[in-house]
Amino acid sequence: MKLTPRLQAIAELIPPDSVVADIGTDHAYLPVYLILNKVSRRVIAVELNQAPLQQASETVAAFNCLQEIDLRLGNGLHALKATDKIDTVVIAGLGGQSIAAILRDGRHLLKSVQQLILQPMSEEGYLRLFLARNGFVLADEALAREGRRFYEIILAKAGREQETDLFRLSFGPRLLEQKPPLLSVFLQEKIRKLKVVYHSLQRAEKDDVSSKLQDVEREIYCLEEVLIGVAASADLNSLS
C-alpha cells in the first residue's frame, strides 16, 4: 500500500514495534500500512460515526488485517481502555482546536502513551501553544506537501518545552531548527496567503481592523526574516 505524502510523513514518525491508536482513522489507510509494513504490532482505529467506521472496516478486511486492527466506535480518546497499553496516539485531519479539545478531555487516558503524533488541518499555532502550556514538549516536526497544500505534523511527548519565544513556538520551533527541504517554499506560501489577507483587510470598510492589520503585518515581517535566514543557511551549505 502506498500512502499519500501526508500520511507517509505521519507513518515515518511512528516508532517500530509500537501499539498505536489512530483517532479519526477515516478509511484506515494508516493502520493498514503500519501493520503490512510491520511498523506496529497492533492498531486501534477509532471513528466517531458509524459510516466512516464501516469504510475503515472494509479497508481492513480487504487487506486481511482484522486480527491486528481493532475497529472501535467512540468519541476521541474515550474509545481507549487502560488495558490497551497504547504507546502512540495519532490524531490527524482535524483543526488544531479540535485536537486540543480531544487531548484536554481525555488527558487521563494518556498515562501509558509515550508520544502523540498530531496533524492539524488549521490552527497549528494554537495547538503548539496548547501543548507547550499543558506539559508537552514538541519533540519533532515535519512538513508534507500534496499539490499546493502543505501539512504540518507534530510529534509531542510529556515534558517541558524549552522554546519561549511565542512566534517561534507558534510557527514550529523544530521546523526552524531542522530546516527541512520544504521549509522555504512553505514560508513563501504562508507569506503569500498573509499578504492576500492583509490587502483584503485594507479594503474592508470597517473601523476595527487596524489591530488585525498590525498583527498580520507583524507576522509577515517575522516570516520574511525567517525566510531570509533559511536562504542564507542554504547558501552556506552549498559553499561547504
Image: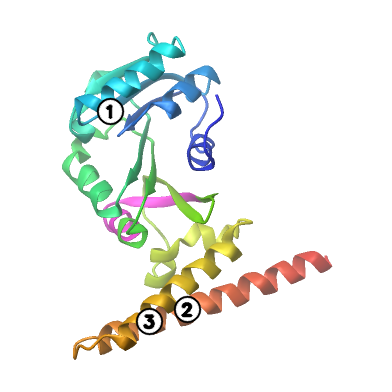
Instruction: Write the residue at 19% across / 38% down.
Output: 106
Labels 1 and 2 touching (C-beta < 8 A) = no
Closer to the chain start, of discs 1 and 3, is 1
Under mark 2, the amino acid is: Cys
Residue highlighted by disc 2: 222
The answer to which of 237 and 110 lies nearer the viewer is 237
- Callout 2: SS: helix
- Category of crowding for the residue at label 3, using alpha-carbon neighbours closer than 10 angstroms: few (below 14), some (14–19), many (at least 20): some
Closer to the chain start, of discs 3 and 2, is 3
Labels 3 and 2 touching (C-beta < 8 A) = no
From the viewer's perspective, tell me whether residue 203 is left or right of residue 15. Answer: left
Residue 48 in percent (x, y) is at 20, 31
CA gap, disc 3 to disc 2?
A: 15 Å
Region rendered in magenta: 128-141
Compared with residue 85, is residue 226 higher up or lower down, i.e. above or below? below
Closer to the chain start, of discs 1 and 2, is 1
- Category of crowding for the residue at label 2, using alpha-carbon neighbours closer than 10 angstroms: few (below 14), some (14–19), many (at least 20): some
> Was residue 35 drawn as part of the magenta stretch in this picture?
no
> Could you tell me if residue 85 is visible in this image?
no
Residue highlighted by disc 3: 198
Instruction: Write the residue at 32% across / 25% down.
Output: 45
Residue highlighted by disc 1: 52
Q: Which mark is residue 107?
A: none
